[in-house]
Image (cartoon, rainbow, N blue to C red):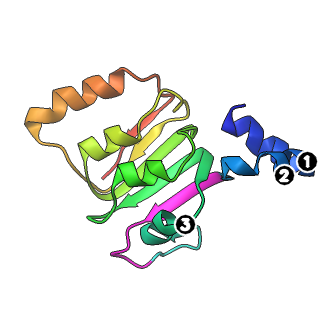
């Protein structure tokens, strides 16, 4: 069963909730912030706390990551059961290849890139070809 459907079913039925516990925690959105800054909003969780959890947390709608030098996209993804989020927001200081790590075919509600992305001119064509291969509803590149 897709994570989004399971998320809503768990809210309606304790039976579904108890029988699907092995799939980990499912949340509407997951907002992660680098350990190198203080979270400025209660919705953000420190990267180290997310990685040290004994269980997986899978966002069904939004993955928001405020990147820093400590964040490894593969480690973040390993703490999810699957990539089921439909929107991706990335901010902070990051490389374009880190963005690509978070992309998946199910992102239908868009990608938003904020702040400082390292994208050398020599890599621009490759980056935009990769983006063009996905069917995003919207794409924002904000500085």
Please give the name of the residue rendered at 24% of the width and 32% of the height, measured from the top-left corner.
127
Please give the name of the residue rendered at 68% of the width and 32% of the height, measured from the top-left corner.
2
Determine which residue is flagged by label 2. Answer: 18
| Mark closer to the chain start, 3 or 2 | 2
Contact? badges 2 and 1 (CB < 8 Å)? yes
The relative height of residue 36 versus residue 6 in the rendered view (above or below) is: below
x, y (%) of residue 1? 72, 31
Q: Is residue 99 visible?
A: yes
Determine which residue is flagged by label 3. Answer: 53
Q: CA distance from mark 1 to mark 3?
A: 24 Å
Contact? badges 3 and 2 (CB < 8 Å)? no
Local SS, label 1? helix
Going by the picture, which residue comes out furthest to the bottom?
38
Magenta segment boundaries in residue numbering? 28-38
The relative height of residue 125 versus residue 56 in the rendered view (above or below) is: above
x, y (%) of residue 54? 57, 64
Local SS, label 2? helix
Q: Is residue 82 left or right of residue 119?
A: right
Q: Is residue 78 left or right of residue 95?
A: right
x, y (%) of residue 116? 25, 56
- 135 or 19, nearer to the observer: 19
Magenta span contains residue 41: no
Tell me the crowding category of disc 2: few under 14, some 14 to 19, or many 20 or more residues within 10 angstroms, Cα based. few
Q: CA distance from mark 3 to mark 2?
A: 20 Å
x, y (%) of residue 28? 67, 50
For residue 51, the mark is none
Please give the name of the residue rendered at 36% of the width and 50% of the height, measured from the top-left corner.
73
Determine which residue is flagged by label 1. Answer: 15
Tell me the crowding category of disc 3: few under 14, some 14 to 19, or many 20 or more residues within 10 angstroms, Cα based. few
Please give the name of the residue rendered at 26% of the width and 54% of the height, measured from the top-left corner.
94
Q: Is residue 11 left or right of residue 110?
A: right
Q: CA distance from mark 2 to mark 1?
A: 5 Å
């Amino acid at each position: 069963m897709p994570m989004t459907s399971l998320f809503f079913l768990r809210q309606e039925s304790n039976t579904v909730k108890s029988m699907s516990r092995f799939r980990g925690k499912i949340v509407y959105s997951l907002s992660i912030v680098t350990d190198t800054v203080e979270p400025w909003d209660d919705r953000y969780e420190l990267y180290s706390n997310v990685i040290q959890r004994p269980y997986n947390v899978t966002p069904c709608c939004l993955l928001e990551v405020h990147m820093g030098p400590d964040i490894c996209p593969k480690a973040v993804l390993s703490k999810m059961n699957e990539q089921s989020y439909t929107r991706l927001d990335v901010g902070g200081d990051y490389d374009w290849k880190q963005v690509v790590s978070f992309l998946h075919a199910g992102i239908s509600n868009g990608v938003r890139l904020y702040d400082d992305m390292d994208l050398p001119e020599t890599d621009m064509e490759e980056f935009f070809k990769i983006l063009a291969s996905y069917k995003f509803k919207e794409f924002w590149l904000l500085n």
